[in-house]
Amino acid sequence: MTTPTPAAVRPGRTVSDRYRLRNALLTAVTYLIALAFLFPLAWMFMAAFKTEAQAFATPPVFAFTPILDNFRQAIPTYLPALKNSLVAAIGSTLLAFALGLPAAFALAVYPTRRAQSVLTWMLSTKFMPAVGVIVPLFLLFRNLHLLDTLPGLILMYTTMNLPLVVWMMHSYMTEIPPAIYEAAKVDGASVAQEFFGIALPLATPGMAATGLLCLIFAWNEVFFALNLTNSDAAPLSVFIGEFKTSQGLFWAQLSAAATLTVLPVLIFGWVAQRQLVRGLSFGAVK
């Protein structure tokens, strides 16, 4: 066996160096993108502990003594809004799953000729701008006495997230091998047993990802909440707007309120990130 010469080894080293350089550049770009997304949150977090004068200061003040006055002023109205947001987000997600899971199962496992048309129609409802339907929705909610009520807000968020549930769960359920359903039918399983015993357990990662997205969308929704609620059922998105008054915009108090608003969903998203990634990649690799 001959010993490789340096000239024969050099090309391999060059390719390896190129891979390392490319990986280093990709890592640097990834960190820069993450920094660009996290910088507004970090800036908001810092402003929450400043005085109003420091929050408005130009150039920005980086060396300051943190204070908690902004949080003390925000918490009394924050807690009722937090309860409304939790009830509306969780309630609408559960209701959207109760309605969307059977629909997704039927369209995926027992499709008809119009199944794709139904899916396309449901997706098309997301294309319409919210401002184009707010007037008839307002009149409908007024006639049904649902204005400024938690049931009305839950119903609104459910209709907003229902197409998302159907489309995502339909894609997950179509990845389940048909042979599993055929074997269950041979054993005498009913449609309900196929749904509860096969489809739901195998699509659990997709349900986790879909549920998290529904919670985030309901938590962050602003337009419908501002127009359909006032005080009794106002969620956190309406609570933040209260800091813009005729006297001006209180940046420090607004930053404290925004920090309290995004903190629960950030913590929940951080804890559930593995389930989210697993659910979003479910069925991507066969």
Image: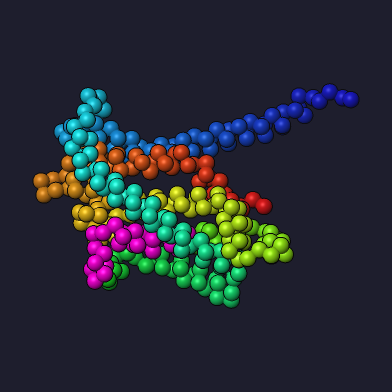
Q: Is residue 176 above or below residue 246?
A: below
* Most common secondary structure along the magenta stretch: helix
Q: Residue furthest bottom?
A: 113
The residue lying toward the viewer, choosing from 132 and 221, is 221
Kindly identify the residue that appears in the image at 29 percent across and 50 percent down: 84
- Residue 69: give x, y in percent of width and height: 19, 32
Q: For the N terminus, give its image quadrant.
A: top right
Q: Is residue 191 above or below residue 259?
A: below
Q: Residue furthest left?
A: 247
Q: Would residue 42 be visible to someone looking at this image?
A: yes
Residue 103 is covered by the magenta coloring: no
Q: Is residue 16 above or below residue 197?
A: above
Q: Quadrant of residue 135?
A: bottom left
**Colour theme:** rainbow
Kindly identify the residue that appears in the image at 37 percent across and 67 percent down: 128
- Residue 67: give x, y in percent of width and height: 21, 28
Q: Quadrant of residue 131?
A: bottom left
Judged left or right of residue 64, residue 174 is right
Kindly identify the residue that appears in the image at 17 percent across and 41 percent down: 250
Q: Residue furthest right?
A: 1
Q: Is residue 164 above or below residue 53?
A: below
- Residue 256: give x, y in percent of width and height: 25, 38
Kindly identify the residue that appears in the image at 51 percent across and 68 percent down: 119
Q: Quadrant of residue 43?
A: top left
- Residues shaded magenta: 141-165
- Residue 159: give x, y in percent of width and height: 39, 64
